[in-house]
Image: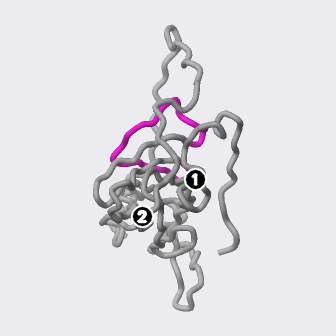
Amino acid sequence: MGLAGLVLIEDEESGRLLLPKQWGIDDVPVIVQDKKFTAAGEIDYQLDVMSAAVGWFGDTLLTNGALYPEHAAPRGWLRLRLLNGCNARSLNFATSDKRPLYVVASDGGLLAEPVKVDELPVLMGERFEVLVDTSDGKPFDLVTLPVSQMGMAIAPFDKPQPVLRVQPLVIPASGKLLDTLAALPALPSLTGLTQRQLQLSMDPMLDRMACRR
C-alpha cells in the first residue's frame, strides 16, 4: 500500500487550546480506506466499465492500514482525526452505542464552537476532527453507517461497518471539550446578490446499474 499519513498544520491559537493532544494516546489519526484484495493478498485495482463510470469501490474496510484495529484510550475526551481516504466511497461515521460526536474542526480548521452530532457524513478526501467522551469506561466501536447512493450499500456495506474499537483504560485523560474554539469572522451578507441554481447529475441508467451490482 505504501506510506500514507496526515499532514497536520498547527498555529499558536490551536496550540493554546486544552483539547486532547497526546499523539497516539488521546489524539488519534483515523484514516479509513476501502480496498479489494486478490487471492494472493495484493490490492486489486482492476477496473471495469462500472468502476470507470461511478468510481472504484473496495469490499474490505481498513483503518490506518489495519482491519478493525483497537485503541486503548484514557478515560475522558478522546480526539479522533478522521480522514476518508476512499477512492469513491462516502462514509457516515457514528458510534455503536449512540454516544454523540462533537465536531471541533474540519478541512478549514477549527470551528467557532463544538457541534454535537449523532452521525457525520464524510466525502472522499474530506477530513474532520471530533471529540468523543469515554469517561464511562465502556468499550464501543466507531462505525460507518450505510450510504444509499450509487451502489455504496452493497454487502457488506448494507449494514454498519466497524471502523475502530475503543477500549477505555482506568487512567484519566487530560484534554477538555471547550465551549469556544476559535474566533471566526462573520459571513458577509448575501442581500442583493444574484442567485443561481445548478443541478449536477449523471446518467440515471448508470446509477441504477451501480445499485444492482
Q: What residue is shown with label 2?
A: 170
> Which is more toward the observer, 95 or 179?
179
Image spot of residue 40 (x, y percent): 56, 91
Left/right of residue 134 with respect to residue 192 in the rendered view: left
The residues tagged by marks 1 and 2 sit, at their Cα atoms, a distance apart of: 35 Å
Q: What's the amino acid at mark 2?
A: Val
Q: Is residue 20 left or right of residue 145?
A: right
Q: Report the amino acid beneath label 1.
A: Gly
Judged from the image, the secondary structure of the residue bearing numbered disc 2 is strand
**Residue 14, image quadrant:** top right
Residue 165 point in image, percent of width and height = 41, 68
Outermost bottom residue:
40
Residue pictured at 55% horizontal, 44% vertical? 19
Q: Is residue 121 magenta?
A: yes
What secondary structure is found at the residue carrying circle 1? loop
Residue drawn at (35%, 61%), measured in percent from left and top?
137
Extent of the magenta region: 106-128
- Mark 2 residue crowding within 10 angstroms, few (<14) / some (14–19) / many (20+): few
Nearer to me, 38 or 46: 38
Most foreground residue, 104 or 126 = 104
Q: Earlier in the sequence, mark 1 or mark 2?
A: 1
Does residue 151 appear in this view?
Answer: no
Q: For mark 1, does the 10 Å Cα neighbourhood hold few (<14), some (14 to 19), or many (20 or more) residues?
A: some
Residue holding disc 1 = 125
Residue 128, position in %: x, y? 52, 47
Q: Position of residue 163 (x, y in %)?
A: 43, 66
Query: For the N terminus, which image quadrant?
Result: bottom right
